[in-house]
Every structure is written in C-alpha cells, then in structure tokens.
Image (spheres, grey):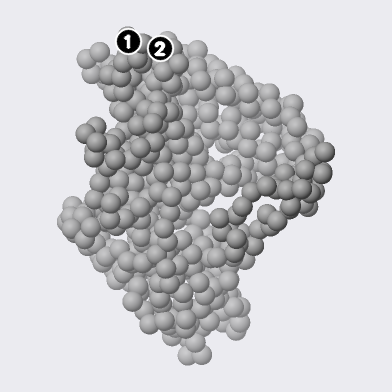
Amino acid sequence: ARIEAEAAVPRGVLDGLAELGAFGIKIPPAYGGLGLSMTTYARAMQLLGSVHQALVALVSAHQSIGVPQPVMLFGTEEQKGRFLPRCAAGEISAFLLTEPDVGSDPARLGMTAHPTEDGTAYVLNGTKLWTTNGPIADLCVVMARVPAGEGHPGGISAFVVEGDAPGLEVLQRNQFMGLRGIENGLSRFTDVRVPADNLVGREGKGLKIALTTLNTGRLALPAACAASAKYSLQIARDWAAKRVQWGQPVGKHEAVASKLSWIAGTTFALESVVELSAVLTDRGTHDVRIEAAIAKLFASEMAWQVADETLQLRGGRGYETAESLRARGEEPVPIEQVLRDLRINRIFEGSSEIMRLLIAREALDPHLSAAGRLVEPDVATALGGRGSVPASYAEFGELAGHMRFVERASRRLARNLFYAMSRHQARLERKQVLLARLVDVGVELYAMSATCARAQMLQQRGAAQGARPRDLADVFCRHARRRVAAHLRGARSNDDAFHYRAAQRIMAGQHAWAEAGILDPYPERSGDLSVPADEAAAVLG
C-alpha cells in the first residue's frame, strides 16, 4: 500500500532486500551472491510479486537484464570481480537498450560509442528511453553503436557505465498506468567517457548479448504473473463464496461458477509453465529460448485475463481502489491495481506480437532452409517447446486423454506448418497473423503438457488433504483444447488478406470520416481529428 501511495519503493525496503541477498540471488557465492537456481529465483520473484509488482521490476531488471547477467555470461574475470560484488551487495543496475525512435528494430540504434584516439576509452552520445531502474541506478548496461574503423570492427556493443558518470543525466522519471513504484526514466548521454575495460564481450556483439540476456531474464516476469493470478484466484474464490445474491452465494450461479473454474484452472497452468521452464533452464542441457519465450507469452496473456475476470466478478468493488474501499469501511481489495500492474507484461521484455514472431522464427528457420525436413515432427516440438509431446500416457491416469490430444494436435500442427510453408514459401515470414495462430497452438500444447505433468507429480507425491490437482489440470486442458481447435481452423480458413487490405485503406485516410464528431483532450498532438461533423454526415448520407 505504501509503494502504491508514494509511487516509490521506500529506502528501507531496498536496504531490507539487500540484507536478504535479493540483489544477488543468481550471482555466484564467489562474488558475494547466493548462487541459487533459476527455479528458486522464480519462486522468489513470485513472492515479491505477491507484495507489489514494482518490486519484481526492480529486482529482475537489476539481476536478469542489468549488469549481473551479461557480465556473468560474457564478461572477463576482471569485470566479474569488479562489478558482481557491488551488484550482490545491493548497488542497483539497469539495462539501457530502447531509444525514442527505436522500437523492436535494433538495427536503427542511434546511440554512438566513439573510441578515443589512444584506445583507452569510448565516448557515448545519445538518448535511452524506458530505462527501468535508470533513475536510481549505480551501474548501467548500455547498448551503443561503435563506428567501424582501423582496429575496430564496430557494430552494436555493450558497455558498463557508472550511474554517476559525468555527462549522464536522467531527464525524466516516467509515469505509467500501473507499476506506480517503478523507477523508469529517460536518460541522455552527452560525451560520457567509458573506460575501454568496461566493454562487455567484443565490439559488434552487443545485440547477441542483449538478446541472450533478455532470453534468460524472461522467466522472472512469468513468475510474477503467476503470483498475481494466485492472488486473483484467492479474491475470486472468497467473493464467490461470501457474496450473496438472490438468496445464495454468487458462486452457485452458473455465470460466476464458470468464471471461477476457469480462473482456478488457468492459475494452476500458469504456475506449471513457470515451474517447467525454470527446471529446463536449470538442467542446462539445451537452449531454452523458445521455452522462455513461451512462458513469457503465455503468462502475460493469461494472467491479464485472470485479473480481468476477477475484477468482473467483483463488479463495482473491483473497479474501486483499495484505499477507497477501506475509507468506507469495506475490505481493501486492490484488484484494479493488479489489473493495471499486469497490463505492461504484454508489452515489455518483448511484446506478445514480438514473442510470437520470435518463437516462429526460432522454430521454423532451420526448416525453411531445408525443404526435405519440412514434415519432420520436431517442427511441432520446436513450436511447442521441449516436453510438449509426451513419450507415453499410462502414468497420467485420468489426464491421459489430454496428453493423447497433445500428440495428435502436434501432428496436425506439423501438417499445417507444411501446408503453410508449401503455399507461402519465403513469404511465410510475412504472414504474421497465420504464424501467430500456429505459435499459439504450440504454446497451448506446452502449457497442457506442463500442467498435466505437474498435476501428476503432485498427486504422486501426496497432495494435501482434499487437494485434487488433476481436477485443475482437467479444467485448464478442456479450455485449451477448444482454443487449439479454433486456432487450427483459423489457420486453414481466415480473412487475413481482407483485413490487411482494409487496414491499408484506413491508414491512407479513406475512413477518417469515422473519427469525426469528437474533441481531442490533447490537441497539441500530431494526430488529425479535424474532419468536420457535417462532412462526415454527408459521407454517411
């Protein structure tokens, strides 16, 4: 409540997190960290997320995409010894990649890093936007473009920059719809001199470092989403049981009961996906880029829907703030805050649209370049992540039918991919809506497998008295199967081309008349809402 009221994480909380070792969970003990596993890290993020999502943003930005991760993966021993102990002790780090004119296309990166003549330093100039932890950072990882020249291959490169470096200034602390305690800003670099020893990796390897860092860091966000979903489930269950309408608890009415069932099943699936993805990461036996992207995509989309449905169940009380409820003597339930805080997860660390394209590219690239392998079953496995296609079913008991569905659907997915690649060939990468449907099938299959496997594991270990995890897995899988069927139908029969043509006409202004008759609350913006109402009426007849 204090973070929400003050729009900042109190200094005492930061000190407490540092004392607990939260800033060094994944940093090896040799450098002052705890050296814990990704599974433990995800559970810690879940705990932080249950308190306030801004805490997850703070700790995960510091540890997963800030200085520790790229230095641990790509830094020299000297750099590890110089920076990691500081990060583990509680000095806060930030990751600076995005720029005002650069969205998801890093090729347009504008910040420059010019080597000095004596080769001892680089001089950075440019602006970085949406710098999580930037306003309070002691250390920053900055992506900048080094010009090619004699002795310098150039390209996008990664640098560690001191937060108080001369010439580095925070122009603004940004304010958002949610995450009121997040420290996120606009930073400007003016002739910031950075020692050459602070170059992480080699020149031109910055993009690889950024993408690798983002891939390994994505599991913090799904864990936080799982925490919000579990809290939403708690609120929904309590409300459904206690709120009485027409003589009985609202949970006895079918409309509410169906929502509560869906919320519970989806929440169980969310945590299952996080657990499986973290375990696969800890094993270290293969690249988990696809699994991490699937977890991020699935968790951010489904947690948002869970919170939205929970708010709907609470009605007007769901839309009202917790402090307003408290002020008039009601139980303070901040579900509107949960919804606001969750919304950004579908955008940052890779939007849902970018995640779908990333998964499709990673899964299909080898097959697009080798026509003879198009129908191999590992295409479907790649889209759904490892573990999405089971080897046997007997151990799953009453969930065996769902696992058989996963196998059959994987084969259908492979056939749909073969058909799409045969039809569109090199143009397939531009069929983004089609690819999104196929990716969503793979995501659902991965989630179904993770959910059934976890339910079976909990059952075998001896679930708590009265607990039936298989029931929740069954609920989720029934919904997932319907979504899979809809995606596969849409892959074969759709209006994608029609809607694309319509969008081009809309962008060209052919339907600007549909925007008439309103006032712009921010008239200084560049958009045009000036079509006169009488002109629109004439067009409409």
> Which disc, if any, is residue 253?
2
Residue in view at x 24 percent, y 50 percent: 2
Q: Residue furthest front?
A: 534
Q: What residue does disc 1 label? A: 248
Crowding at dot 1, Cα within 10 Å, few <14 / some 14-19 / many 20+, comes out as few
Mark 2 residue type: His
Q: Residue furthest bottom?
A: 118
Q: Calculate the distance from the C-alpha at mark 2 to the C-alpha at mark 1.
A: 8 Å
Disc 2 to disc 1: CB gap under 8 Å:
yes
* x, y percent for residue 246: 36, 11
At label 1, which amino acid type do we have?
Answer: Gln
Q: Secondary structure at mark 2?
A: loop
**Residue 524, percent from left and from top:** 59, 64
Asked whether residue 283 appears in the rendered view, the answer is no
Q: Is residue 529 above or below residue 451?
A: below
Question: What is the quadrant of residue 165 in the picture?
Answer: bottom left
Residue 176 found in image quarter: bottom left
